[in-house]
């Protein structure tokens, strides 16, 4: 059962059909072979028994008890030496042998001649191999009381050959029948599963964002499933929209209050309380970044496993690069972009903007002359995006520290220490990963792995 549980529905049905056909064919072969064997054996022995009666009728004995044939035996096979067909007639004083025996006797167990024995058959070792024997003990005639044994032996290979030929033909017939039935079962299974193949293709279109629901005509057995799935997709989409709206409203409300507090902080500065003002403004900035982080996290958590969430990496990247170049135009940083992968990524466009914005903001802040951006397809159905700068970089012991929420390696740098923490958390929510390394220019390399859309 565990083996079947890991199989696809198609393989289950075909495997079950193959097993049933093979078992049925073996049982059918065994049954028909047994029936044929019984029928042919009965027919074979009936024919030999007729030979016994014929031999009994043409056997004569003279007054001295010597046996002779009153007429020639009708079946010529018994006249050919070592033909495998033999007869023998015995009395206490005489014996007659078929020409096929070539003067040899059949190796029979001695039996008394003083009683009438019904026809019976058994096996012996004949002149040319194992033989089937039909034997009858009787008296020559009612007028004399001379008992005799009439024996006919036939090589078992003759019966075996008939049965073997039939079994060979029967086996090939069942092989052809089984293969035909297996092929028919495979074709029938493929035809029966076509609606599920179409359903799978429709799901791929939904995940790719090409359609919003399952479309097309389906068999009545599948239609309720399609209807329920469409309802589930629509409900999930509505829930996502409501969650985003609520998150936006929450962020708007909190940021409004923070703006008021920040304004009050600036008023304190005007009143000469610079230290209190600086503390309030700094904490408000950190709180705002925390709000942005939690809103982005909530949005990504809701969208990460929703169908139809796809983005084009290059389309999202280039506008952010241009914005950063404008923001840091005084540094005159050269940006080199090499996008070798054109697969969409299964990341919401807003969240992808948040990820790339934080990475590039960090790179532009520390870069001296240039930034290199490279995107490539990698194993596991992912896209690797590397951002290399020529800034001062970070020591290896700082690689994990900077991913901690609210932690900055360089305390002299402005900010709340949330940029890279947001990047890694969002990337991981979408099933990717993020890591830091040393860039070829001795700066910092930030590499993220994003899931690509399959197909």
Image (cartoon, rainbow, N blue to C red):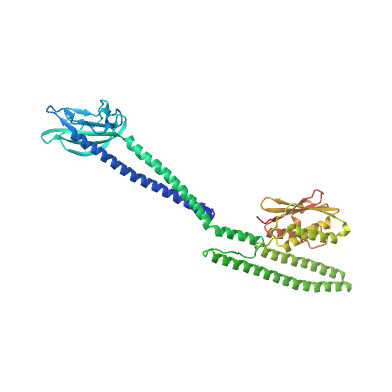
Q: Residue at x 42, y 45 (%)?
A: 173
**Is any part of residue 405 visible from this angle?**
no
Quarter where residue 77 is shown: top left
- Assign the C terminus to one quadrant of the image: bottom right
- Report the front residue among 259 and 264: 259
Residue 253, horizontal then vertical, whole percent: 75, 73
Q: How many marks?
A: 0
Q: Residue at x 51, y 51 (%)?
A: 3
Quarter where residue 307 is shown: bottom right
As drawn, the residue found furthest toward the left would be: 143
User: Is 378 rendered above or below residue 317?
Assistant: above
Quarter where residue 267 is shown: bottom right
Q: Judge left or right: residue 429 versus residue 42.
A: right
Q: Residue at x 22, y 36 (%)?
A: 52
Residue 7, horizontal then vertical, whole percent: 53, 53
User: Is 162 rendered above or below residue 23?
Assistant: above
User: Is 382 rendered above or below residue 78?
Assistant: below
């Amino acid at each position: 059962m565990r083996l079947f549980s890991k199989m696809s529905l198609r393989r289950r049905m075909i495997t079950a059909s193959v097993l049933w056909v093979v078992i049925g064919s073996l049982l059918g072969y065994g049954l028909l072979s047994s029936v044929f064997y019984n029928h042919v054996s009965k027919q074979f022995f009936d024919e030999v028994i007729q030979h016994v009666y014929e031999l009994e009728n043409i056997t004569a004995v003279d007054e001295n008890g010597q046996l002779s044939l009153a007429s020639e035996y009708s079946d010529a096979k018994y006249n050919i030496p070592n033909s495998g067909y033999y007869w023998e007639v015995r009395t206490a004083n005489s014996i007659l042998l078929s020409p096929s025996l070539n003067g040899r006797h059949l190796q029979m167990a001695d039996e008394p001649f003083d009683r009438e024995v019904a026809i019976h058959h058994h096996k012996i070792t004949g002149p040319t191999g194992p033989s089937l024997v039909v034997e009858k003990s009787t008296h020559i005639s009612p007028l004399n009381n001379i008992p005799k044994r009439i024996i006919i032996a036939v090589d078992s290979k003759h019966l075996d050959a008939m049965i073997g030929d039939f079994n060979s033909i029967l086996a090939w017939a069942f092989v052809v029948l089984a293969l035909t039935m297996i092929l028919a079962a495979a074709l029938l299974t493929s035809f029966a599963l076509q609606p599920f193949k179409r359903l799978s293709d429709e799901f791929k279109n939904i995940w790719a964002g090409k359609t919003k629901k399952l479309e097309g005509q389906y068999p009545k057995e599948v239609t309720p499933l399609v209807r329920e799935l469409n309802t589930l997709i629509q409900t999930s989409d509505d829930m996502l929209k409501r969650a985003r709206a609520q998150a936006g409203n929450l962020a708007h409300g909190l940021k409004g209050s923070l703006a008021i507090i920040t304004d009050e902080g600036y008023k304190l500065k005007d009143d000469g309380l610079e230290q209190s003002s600086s503390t309030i403004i700094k904490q408000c900035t950190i709180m705002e970044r925390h709000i942005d982080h939690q809103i982005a996290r909530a949005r990504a958590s809701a969208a990460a496993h929703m169908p139809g969430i796809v983005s084009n990496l290059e389309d999202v990247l280039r506008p952010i690069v241009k914005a950063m170049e404008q923001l840091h135009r005084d540094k005159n940083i050269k940006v080199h972009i090499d996008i070798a992968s054109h697969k969409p990524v299964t990341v919401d466009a807003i969240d992808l903007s948040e990820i790339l914005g934080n990475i590039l903001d960090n790179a532009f802040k520390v870069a001296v002359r240039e930034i290199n951006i490279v995107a490539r397809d990698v194993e596991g159905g992912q896209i690797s995006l590397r951002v290399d700068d020529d800034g001062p970089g970070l020591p290896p012991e700082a690689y994990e520290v900077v991913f901690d929420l609210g932690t900055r390696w360089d305390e002299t740098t402005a900010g709340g220490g949330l940029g890279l923490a947001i990047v890694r958390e969002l990337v991981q929510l979408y099933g990717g990963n993020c890591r830091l390394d040393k860039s070829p220019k001795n700066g910092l390399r930030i590499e993220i792995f994003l899931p690509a859309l399959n197909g």
